Image (tube, helix red, strand yellow):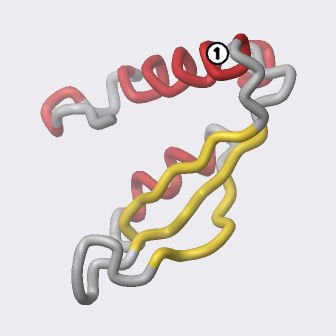
Amino acid sequence: MAVSTDCQRAGLGTQLLVAAMEVASEERVATLDLTVSQKNVSAVAFYTSLGFRVVGDVPDMFGPDRSRLRMRRSIEGFGRAALGA
């Protein structure tokens, strides 16, 4: 999932991810995992702000020197109220 660079910081990524977490919660999914480039500091901060935590790394996921961080968030009982939305 991605938001075009010229549309970032307008809340679209939050809306997409919150909607995905709501559907996952309705389907009784307990946790969501994602990977993000270690170099993408703003994306790591974004996911952290939505309750994701770094749980490990995936070395060379897309080739040499292209490692990713694995992030995870519990979504049991998730709702917009959990984010103050």
* Residue 43 in the figure: left or right of residue 2: right
Q: Is residue 78 above or below residue 33?
A: above
Of 12 and 79, nearer the camera is 79
Report which residue position mark 1 lands on.
Answer: 22
Q: Residue furthest left?
A: 6
Q: Amino acid at mark 1?
A: Glu
**In terms of depth relative to the viewer, which is nearer, 5 or 37?**
37
The residue under the point 20% across, 27% down is: 7
For residue 71, which quarter of the picture?
bottom right
Q: Nearer the viewer, residue 11 or 28?
A: 28
**77 sits to left or right of 15:** right
For the residue labelled by badge 1, is the local secondary structure a helix, a strand or a loop? helix
Residue 19 lies, in percent from the top left, at 53, 15
In this rendering, is residue 51 above or below 44? Answer: above
Vertical relation: 20 (above or below) 58: above
| Image point (46%, 58%), residue name | 35
Task: Give the quarter of the image for residue 2.
Answer: top left
**Crowd class of label 1 (few under 14; some 14 to 19; many from 20; radius 10 Å):** some
- Count how many numbered circles sit on residues in the image: 1
Q: How far across and how far down the image is residue 73, in percent? A: 71, 44
